[in-house]
Amino acid sequence: MLMITELLTPTPGPLWRLVKQAGIDHVVTLLDGGEQLWRWPEPGQEDGPPPFEAPPRGERAWDRSALARLQAAYREYGLELAVIEDTAPMDAVRLGTAGRDEQISWLHDQIRAMGELGKPLNSEGGVDHAVGPMTSGILRGIEDGWFMSEIAEAAFQYQVSLEKGDKKVVGVNCHTASVTHELEILRVSHEVEREQVATLKTRKTDRDEDAVRAAVQHMVEVARTDGNMVPAMLDAVRAEATLGEICDALRDEWGVYREPARF
């Protein structure tokens, strides 16, 4: 089903009322202080967004209580919040600078809060995934290549900051003097490989092949349902099915996922 939505900022105003009067019932929202809204230029601003300032301690726009209040505010105008097209700021995560760990924790908090409220993240046009609204944003992000594009963008920004010298990496763009003495390198003998192969061959010879096949087949049958696969997978392990045999069986059933290239 096609859902018509309107992208709104989180501040109530005449535009909210106008959207409802235009016959639109569902909205896509940004967050006050979020990644996308922070990057929106102010009138007359030409040099990009200002330096991000961390929110004060206390409630933040991506906390559950704040998201629930924002949802209630839209409902007062007769609008239903369909999608949150914004995240907690991630500039430090992209550049690998100070504050990165804190921003990652913000994103964890937001994903958890949105899951509890049943709101998808970064879902195009507010279209829910078949699995359900709690995970639709993440699954659509994987299928549409959003995560791949974000990783590529982060890698690009990291490389730019490295080449400009904004980010220092010992041995790469600073303190590059070589070690004068020879380093001892760990070298693993091929004998180790031969011993491991022989051990695996012995285990396969001594195990009950019928029990292994039955356990792996049962695991595949469970994989075709919505049941919990962990017990069946553990039974296969107890029957001494190898990791490769378990993975091959699931590959035959599900295929192999290949993320679309997005740059």
Image (tube, helix red, strand yellow):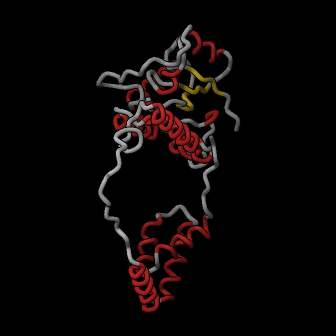
Q: Quadrant of the N terminus?
A: top right
Q: Residue furthest top?
A: 44
- Residue at (38%, 40%) from the top-left corner? 169
Who's the residue at 60% across and 23% down the image?
7
Q: Nearer the viewer, residue 111 or 27?
A: 111
Outermost front residue: 180
Looking at the image, the residue that sits furthest to the right is: 2
Image quadrant containing the C terminus: top right
247 and 2: which one is in front? Answer: 247
Q: Position of residue 85 (x, y in %)?
A: 54, 30
Q: Provide residue 227's location: percent of width, then percent of height.
A: 50, 63
Q: Quadrant of residue 196?
A: bottom left
Q: Residue at x 60, y 58 (%)?
A: 257
Whole-percent x and y of residue 6?
63, 23
**Quarter of image, res 98:** top left
* Residue 179 higher or lower than 22, as above or below: below
